[in-house]
Amino acid sequence: ASYSRIKEVDDKVQAFLTLDEEGAREQAKKLDEALESDDTRGLLFGLPAGIKDNIVTNGLRTTCASQLLSNFEPVHNATVINGLENAESVTIGKLNMDEFAMGSSNENSGFQTTRNPWNIEYVPGGSSGGSAASVAAGEVTFALGSDTGGSIRQPASYCGVVGLKPTYGRVSRFGLVAFASSLDQIGPLTRTVEDNALVLGEIAGHCKKDSTSADVSVPDYLSSLIGDVKGLRIAVPKEYLGEGVNEDVRQRVLEALKVLEEQGATWEEVSLPHSQYAVAAYYLLASSEASANLARFDGVRYGVRAKNPNNLIDMYKETRSNGFGDEVKRRIMLGTFALSSGYYDAYYKKAQKVRTLIKQDFDKIWEDYDVVIGPTAPTTAFKVGEKIDDPLTMYANDILTIPVNLAGVPAISVPCGFSEGLPVGLQIIAKPFEEGTVYRVAHAYE
Ligand code: GLN
């Protein structure tokens, strides 16, 4: 059913970069055969899954949507893929994204631009645009994405699906191709909150192969879905409903708060005063980390190598010049500059200090409130081509998702109505390791 849906719609949606029909059928057959001797089923038994193409899959091409990795076949699985295999889902294929997860629209893919299933003239968001679009278009039951500065939540919002960025350290990053290691997290995109909780339960947990993975036990997320929010204290940052937020988006969020109020929650306006510096700090920090992480793509160890270089330096240069797209080059140059001697204190170190202030803004909120709520993005999806020539406007679009990554806290985007035919997303943020609270609120609202 999954493959016939893909055949039906994917030439329009263009969510998939690689399909593995043979492998998937084999995987499914094995699951069926195993039932003959043992009738127990994994929690995700037989469910078709799509995987963002920066998560490595053993023997299955993993490109990060970069020409540089167009022929890269990993020799092992990411920890999350092993988690899914244990839970007995079936991997259908690999999903499009912005190259190396840098972007907010999927237009930075080195292969194709995924389209928003609600209206194919619009972007699906990014960088996990393929993941969000494949779930919204009914091609798979769930998908995995990654979120460094909003890349799960913003496309979930634009495509009208549920997307969760877990607490930093909750899900292993082993086998996630690193963009900005201090911010990256893998998380699920699904059609319902319940599905999301189910998938997170199977991919979360301590992993010895990721030194930043947290040794914290994984609760039963499904038991958080109690269907009520009585007594819950909600903080609504005035910065999240202020200037730059579209009027329809603001209205949908206020309507959602009303629904939660009717169910016994209370809300108050608060301030996250340093949010205004989040975008600037993030683009310095993420680019700095990316400039170091992407140094490994030298033409020797992975992917496509320059054809006829004159010498070693020439080989590096040609491989990287031909292999990386414009946005990736822009980030490497910005990051290298910010880390260079003489500029480090003024840019990188300053941005780290701002990051601490942003985290402290949230810490202060948790003294009096259980969750922070606002929109996921200031607008609904924009048109393909509308922002691609203006990187700063594209970056500014991440203003409501980035603070969450800088603070390391968990957050979800859940659909909350429409504006002119396009979905609006409600963002729910909680304390570190309180994914259960995020799910409880999202489920009660949904
Ligand atoms: N849009 C942001 C960026 O381009 C977020 C990316 C992400 O979360 N991977 O960096």
Image: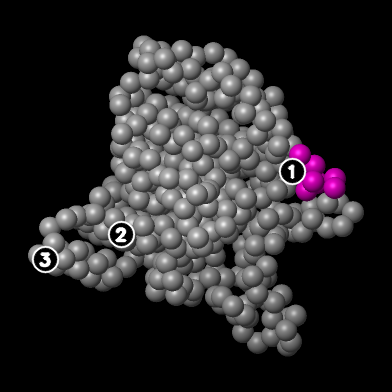
Please rate how many residues cluster around mark 3, counting C-alpha atoms within 10 Å: few if below 14, some from 14 to 19, many from 20.
Answer: few
Classify mark 3: helix, strand or loop: helix
Numbered mark located on residue 86 in the image: 2
Asked if one can make out residue 190 in the rendered structure from this viewpoint, the answer is no
Q: Position of residue 7 (x, y in %)?
A: 27, 59
Q: Amino acid at mark 2?
A: Asn
The foreground one among 89 and 119 is 89
Image quarter where the C terminus lies is: top left
Q: Which amino acid type is marked by label 1? A: Gln
In the drawing, does residue 148 fall left or right of residue 128? Answer: right
Q: What is the residue that sits farthest to the left in this orientation?
A: 36
Q: Is residue 124 above or below residue 80?
A: above
> Along the polypeptide, which appears first: circle 1 or circle 3?
3
What secondary structure is found at the residue carrying circle 2? helix
- Residue placed under numbered mark 1 in the picture: 352
Which picture quadrant has residue 94? bottom left
Is residue 350 shown in magenta? Answer: yes
Residue for badge 3: 37
| Magenta range | 345-353
